[in-house]
Image (cartoon, helix red, strand yellow):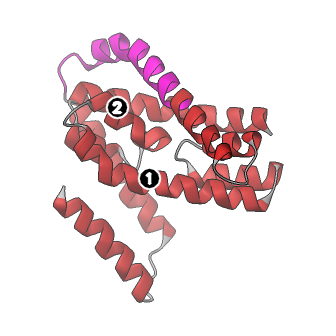
């Protein structure tokens, strides 16, 4: 956990204080390698297809609860900021997928709200990196919820390192289901 925090902080500092440029292709390749190796770990599990089939219901329930909680608490922001209910609800509908939600909301509603959504979803991902290891000690499914849509890609390694193989599979399923839901929900709100 300490190593993970040090890595994030040193990466942030390196990017902020230097002119290091990393190709998006390299980042994509590294992300795909991470997902590949976690996939190997999950796939090596005995009777994996039976476990996937038996875990589908749990994946859908987990995804529904994660999305519902995100929308409820996200819309509550309207009581504390200048955002109205619809804006706060829409900004929280990215569920951690900052690159898509920011662009969609900018196109459908306003660039300002798109920036709010982008920023809040980036913060959600950073908080997931920091909180998943701690929360997983008390509730693995609760920890998985923190990552939202990112549990199928960028947070998959963190989820895998801090939860059981069964719950890593649920986290991956949650990420897929929520990622498929993001464009639909944002379109319905705006």
* In the displayed structure image, the side of residue 21 where residue 107 appears, left or right: right
Toward which corner of the image does residue 138 lie, by quadrant? top left
Q: CA distance from mark 1 to mark 2?
A: 15 Å
Name the dominant secondary structure of the magenta segment: helix
Identify which residue is drawn at 40% across, 40% down.
Answer: 146
Q: Which residue is mark 1?
A: 125
Q: Position of residue 184 (x, y in %)?
A: 70, 32
User: Of residues 178 and 52, which is closer to you in this image?
Assistant: 178
Q: Residues within 10 Å of mark 2 (few under 14, many from 20)?
A: some
Q: Is residue 54 magenta?
A: yes
Which of pointers 1 and 2 lies earlier in the amino acid sequence?
1
The label shown at residue 107 is: none
Q: Secondary structure at mark 2?
A: helix
* In the displayed structure image, the side of residue 160 where residue 80 appears, left or right: right
Residue lying furthest bottom = 18
* In the displayed structure image, the side of residue 132 where residue 124 appears, left or right: right
Q: Is residue 116 magenta?
A: no
Above or below residue 90? Residue 106 is below
Q: Residues within 10 Å of mark 1 (few under 14, many from 20)?
A: many
Q: Position of residue 144 (x, y in %)?
A: 35, 35
Identify which residue is drawn at 46% across, 18% down.
Answer: 61
Identify which residue is drawn at 39% across, 16% down.
Answer: 58
First to last magenta residue range: 45-67
Q: Are discs 1 and 2 less than 8 Å apart at CB? A: no
Q: Which residue is mark 2?
A: 142
User: Of residues 78 and 116, which is closer to you in this image?
Assistant: 78
Q: Position of residue 73 (x, y in %)?
A: 55, 37
Identify which residue is drawn at 49% across, 33% down.
Answer: 176
Toward which corner of the image does residue 86 lie, by quadrant? top right
Image quadrant containing the C terminus: top right
């Amino acid at each position: 956990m300490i190593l993970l925090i040090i890595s994030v902080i040193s990466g942030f500092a390196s990017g902020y204080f230097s002119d290091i440029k990393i190709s998006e292709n390299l980042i994509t390749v590294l992300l795909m390698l991470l997902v590949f190796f976690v996939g190997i770990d999950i796939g090596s599990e005995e009777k994996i297809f039976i476990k996937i089939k038996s875990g589908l219901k749990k994946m859908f329930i987990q995804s529904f609860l994660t999305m519902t909680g995100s929308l409820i608490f996200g819309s509550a922001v309207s009581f504390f900021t200048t955002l109205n209910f619809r804006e706060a609800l829409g900004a929280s509908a990215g569920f951690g997928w900052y690159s898509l939600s920011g662009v969609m909301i900018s196109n459908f509603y306003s660039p300002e709200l798109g920036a709010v959504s982008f920023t809040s979803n980036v913060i959600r991902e950073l908080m997931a990196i920091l909180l998943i290891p701690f929360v997983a000690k008390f509730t693995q499914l609760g920890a998985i919820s923190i990552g939202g849509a990112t549990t199928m890609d960028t947070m998959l390694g963190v989820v895998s390192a801090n939860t059981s193989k069964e719950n890593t599979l649920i986290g991956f399923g949650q990420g897929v289901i929520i990622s498929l839901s993001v464009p639909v929900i944002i379109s319905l709100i705006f």
